[in-house]
Amino acid sequence: MVYNIELEIVKTAPDNERARYSLDMADGFLFSAKEKLSNKDYGSSIEDARNAICLASAAIMFKDGYISSTFEGTLSYLSQHYPGKLPLDEWNKVEFTIISRGGVYDLLNTIVKKTREQQSKKAFETASIFVNVTRQILI
C-alpha cells in the first residue's frame, strides 16, 4: 500500500465491486436530488447532488485502486488521471455553495440574483454529468 501524505491518497488494489456499489449509491442520491429539486427543497437537493458527485468520484478511484480522504486529494487525482472528462470546476462550486450557506453569502447571492433554485439546478446538472461520465469510465 502506498500513501501520499500531502494529498492523503492511498494506493490499494482495484475494487470493481466497491466501484459498482458507489455508482449505485450515486444514482440513488441523483434521483433524490431531482425529486427534492421538483419539490423546491433546494438546500437538500444541492446536498444530495453533492453526495452523488462524491460517490461517483469514489467509484472511479475504487476502480483505479485509490482512496482519498480529502476533497483536494480527490480533485487532484481526477484532474491528473481524467483531464477534461469531469466537471471538476463545477464540483468545486457545489462544494463552495454547501460550505458557504447563510449569512453574508446569502445576501451576496440576493444582490447578484443567484437564487438557491439556480444553484440547485446547476448542482443537479453537474451531478448528472459526473454520474454519467463515471458510468462510462466503469464500463
Image (cartoon, helix red, strand yellow):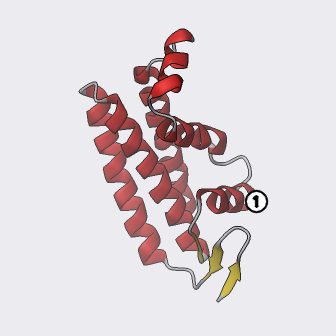
Q: Quadrant of the N terminus?
A: bottom right
Residue 29, image x, y percentages: 34, 49
Residue 97, image x, y percentages: 51, 35
Q: Is residue 45 above or below residue 139?
A: above
Q: Residues within 10 Å of mark 1 (few under 14, many from 20)?
A: few
The answer to which image quadrant residue 92 occupies is top right
As drawn, is 22 to the left or to the right of 81? left
- Nearest to the observer: residue 16 or residue 110: 110
Badge 1 is on which residue?
80
- Residue drawn 59% across the image and 37% down it: 93
- Residue drawn 74% across the image and 70% down it: 6
Residue 32, image x, y percentages: 29, 43
Q: Is residue 68 above or below residue 80?
A: below
Q: Is residue 58 above or below residue 10?
A: above
> Of helix, strand and loop, which one carries label 1?
helix
The answer to which image quadrant residue 10 occupies is bottom right
As drawn, is 37 to the left or to the right of 131? left
- Nearest to the observer: residue 101 or residue 78: 101
As drawn, is 33 to the left or to the right of 110? left
As drawn, is 49 to the left or to the right of 11? left
- Residue drawn 59% across the image and 78% down it: 65
